[in-house]
Image: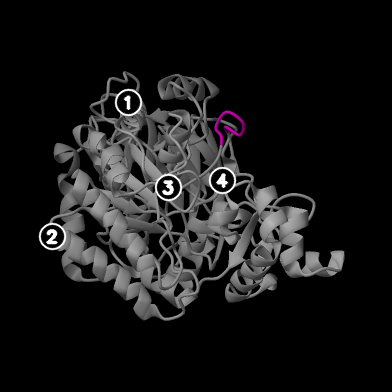
Amino acid sequence: MRALMNTASIYTGKVFLAFTNFAIVRPIAASFFAAFALLLSACSGSGGPDYSIQYDIHIINGTLIDGTGMQGYAADVLVRDGEIVYTGQTDLNRTNATTVIDAAGKVVTPGFIDLHAHGDPLQTPDFENFLAMGVTTIVLGQDGTSPDTDYLGDWMKRVDDARPGTNIVMFIGHNTVRSQASVPLRTSISERDIERMQDRIIAAMEDGAFGLSTGLEYDPGRFAGRDELRAIAEPLARYGGIVMSHLRNEDSGAVEDALLELITMGRDAGVPVHVSHIKIVLGNNPTAANNLIQLMDMARNDGMTITADVYPYTASYTGISLLFPDWAKPPNVYEDVVRDRRRDLAAFLENRVNNRNGPGATLIGTGKWAGKTLAEVADELGKPFEDVLIDDIGLYGTSAAYFVMNEDVMRRFIRDPHISISSDGSPSMLHPRGYGSFAKIIRQYVMQENLITLEEAIRKMTGHSAGILGLHDKPAGMKRGYIRDGYAADILVFDPAEVRDNAWFQNPHRLATGFDTIIVNGTVVQSEGRPSGARAGRVLRKSGSTATSQ
């Protein structure tokens, strides 16, 4: 990337706004890529833009990092009607554009795609937490849970009418489908049970869902066996859908078998599979990460498509029921378990929590004890933490952050070329990942540690994620993930040296900073680091479905 210190400017009509930016200095990579980038720049747009038409946005003087992983190169970008229509060299004096953005000393990248997110666009349509860290598309319906509606298409229409701040990709959740279809809480189920679930999955795919999510660590998904997993995945094949899975068990010593179960599911049904928020709970040796990566590599060598995503924090976040034994959960009655097996339950909880780094490593995220550790709550109430869990919190009484992961293991996942970046966050979750994940990757793992290059980080956040979802295969103007002619104009302009993740566990809702310009579907929603108030997102529908809106 070029070493520059310039005045960056935005021209809107005849209004001139200027601000000073100090660009970063990064070494120039292999000369081959630089030469190839210049060739692409020179050849883009069939020799040059059409100077006879009016453009909406003209981005000049930036270093284009296009989402492919290729080294950044000098190129301008023209946007019209929400679409990137030209990338290459332009003549400012001959180009007519409503808004001109001078990106001197900055990079121009695709908007980031969060492969695993949470939130309700009907309740918090702004999604400012995602936009502030450069995310322009989020993937919802995760961990087996999607909107509890009979017609996903109707819900999508309501979201479009609410004008979300980001684009939204939807998955249909297995746990939701299983509950809606009134499937019994057991592994052995009938053919009619299977058919009812398949009918709902097919309807969701027809409405534009991109695939199926599973949450086999949760109720009722934990009851699903191999036959059920194959059957619910089979309808995806005709739609080009994918299975995204919160694995059955992410603990060290069990996660490999859980990964093999997902691989088997994909192989049985003939569909691609994806590991959500890949991690190893209490796995402190990076060799364990290598083992999971090797299992995925072996599956690819056998012809399967398998990918994953990771978020850059060593604490997970989920419901407190994660700590409880299966025999305390439905279809068993919790109150009966407490009455009849309290001593067993207390011993189980004491052992499980202590094996997960103790009660001080569980940070309560919701309810009256939010922000306190389980150890602090136990001290406050003057009772053992296992009794707090049984009597004062209960099976579904709160969610919590669990500090149970190793950073070196996480770094190994971040480096793997087949693993994208996600947040697993939401606007309301009391975990900083929903406000900082993408900014943290740039600040810490690119700029500070040089764990991966900026180009590779951008690829993991954009082009690679879009490929997993099939967004490169959509019609012109609907494609996402690259800065390329014919792609939707989801674009960022920023100085990587200025990007900051400002959220932490003590203050998890602080917005990220450093993303100067954010463009969603050709609309500038953030300029000079300040939100414009515009909401330009939309629900994206899977190509090939019967949905008419893309």
Q: Which residue is mark 1?
A: 199
Q: Which mark is residue 302?
A: 2
Q: Vertical placement of 538 versus 392: above or below? A: above
Give the label, 1 or 3, closer to the camera: 3
Query: Residue 467, image x and y in percent?
Result: 26, 47
Left or right: where does residue 83 sit relative to residue 473? right
| Residue range highlighted in magenta | 120-125
- Quadrant, the N terminus: bottom left
User: Tag 2 or tag 1, which sits nearer the N-term?
Assistant: 1
Q: Which residue is mark 3?
A: 223
- Amino acid found under the numbered disc labelled 1: Asp
In magenta segment, residue 445: no
Q: Which mark is residue 330?
A: 4
Query: Residue 59, image x and y in percent?
Result: 38, 42
User: Tag 2 or tag 4, which sits nearer the N-term?
Assistant: 2
Query: Residue 222, image x and y in percent?
Result: 44, 50
Left or right: where does residue 404 sit relative to residue 261? right
